[in-house]
Amino acid sequence: MNSPRPYPYLVTGAAGFIGARFVESCNRQKIPVISVDETPLFSSRPEHDQIDYGLIVGRENLWDWLETHTPQIGAIIHLGAITDTRETNLDQLNFFNLLYSQRLWECATRHSIPLLYASSAATYGDGKLGYDDDEGLIPQLLPLNAYGDSKQKFDCWALDQERLGNHPPLWSGFKFFNVYGFGERHKDFMSSVVLHAYDQIQASGRVTLFKSHKAGIADGHQKRDFIAVEDVVEALHFAAKKPIQRGIYNLGTGEARTFLDLVRAVFSALGRPEKIEFIDTPEILREKYQYFTEAKMQRFIAQGYSRPLRSLEAGVEEYVRRLKKAQST
């Protein structure tokens, strides 16, 4: 997106996992950014110390700031959200994942600013309807948790607003599948299995994985579409710069891999022998557990995106290399 405005991107969730990696990529490309998040987070995450966040706007001050500064913004990259799939506080989820997103949409519409936002593969629920990002199917999806439901509600609202003629000049949402990569340690329990496996192997030489509680699926053979954060960031840049046509798109690799594949890649990257134990999936998670996800990527590819994606093994090796480097400094 070639914009004459002084700040091509305003990035929400800029101190978060994907947001920080997006800003970091802007640093490499010398793209000025406006970074939005809770102010204390910009200085409390050591993994992000080398990032130049550009102009920082505290999330609490964003709306006042936008009143007079929207002419400076080329596009809004909305990555901020509550992403904990265990979150049950519906008021919090409704406020941050729905109302906050609606307000940004309305601002982008009012000031003719393109908007890209993060949705989630959690909207697909148990996968009974498949993982096709055909927008006609979106209202029928049944997420398994409140987080997924909050993302689903915004997707449906965005499509309704478009039908009413109330939308930004360009807009696109992305259903992120299982994103892993450097800079997610602050997510704690919600960080990827790659990081958990890395920490467990370093501490004890072994990894624990959840048993399967579904007939016909062996322990460790639960499958997800794992995508490296670097590939997510590159896809977002492509979508913004081209720009792509309006709509809601899947963003994964298009290939489901097992959790066994994933942890074996971590053992390999560390040069350690495989030692894997299986434990019961916690009761609180069992009924809301996705046993399979796999993004259908044809619609996004049809927009002209042809960049090769990292294999799981290559992405994990790159991630482990960066973890080891951070650990040694």
Image (cartoon, rainbow, N blue to C red):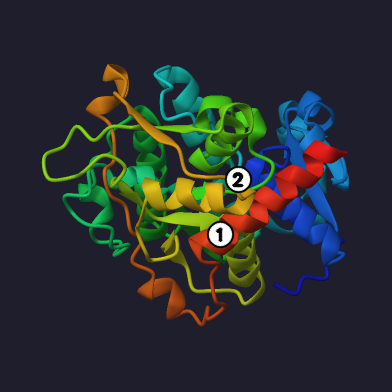
Name the image quarter holding residue 96. Answer: top right
Is residue 5 among what the camera can see?
no
- Residue at the spot 65% in from the left edge and 51% down from the top edge: 319
Mark 1: few, some, or many residues within 10 Å (few <14, many ≥20)? many
Q: Which kind of residue does numbered mark 1 sit on?
A: Pro
Looking at the picture, tell me which residue is in the foreground, 244 or 113: 244
Residue 11 in percent (x, y) is at 71, 48
Residue 240 in percent (x, y) is at 63, 67
Looking at the picture, tell me which residue is in the foreground, 55 or 66: 55
On the picture, is 60 further left or further right than 152? right
- The residue identified by callout 2 is 79
Tell me the quarter of the image containing the C terminus: top right
Residue 164 in percent (x, y) is at 38, 56
- Residue at the spot 11% in from the left edge and 39% down from the top edge: 215
In the image, residue 140 above or below residue 253: above
Name the image quarter holding residue 216. Answer: top left
On the picture, is 268 further left or further right than 175? right
Nearest to N terminus: mark 1 or mark 2: 2
Q: Which kind of residue does numbered mark 2 sit on?
A: Leu
In the image, residue 3 above or below residue 258: below
Kindly indicate whether the residue at mark 2 contacts the one at mark 1 (C-beta within 8 angstroms): no
- Residue at the spot 61% in from the left edge and 53% down from the top edge: 269
Residue 195 in percent (x, y) is at 58, 38
- The residue identified by callout 1 is 168
Name the image quarter holding residue 13. Answer: top right
Q: CA distance from mark 1 to mark 2?
A: 17 Å
Residue found at the far left of this picture: 215
Is residue 197 among what the camera can see?
yes
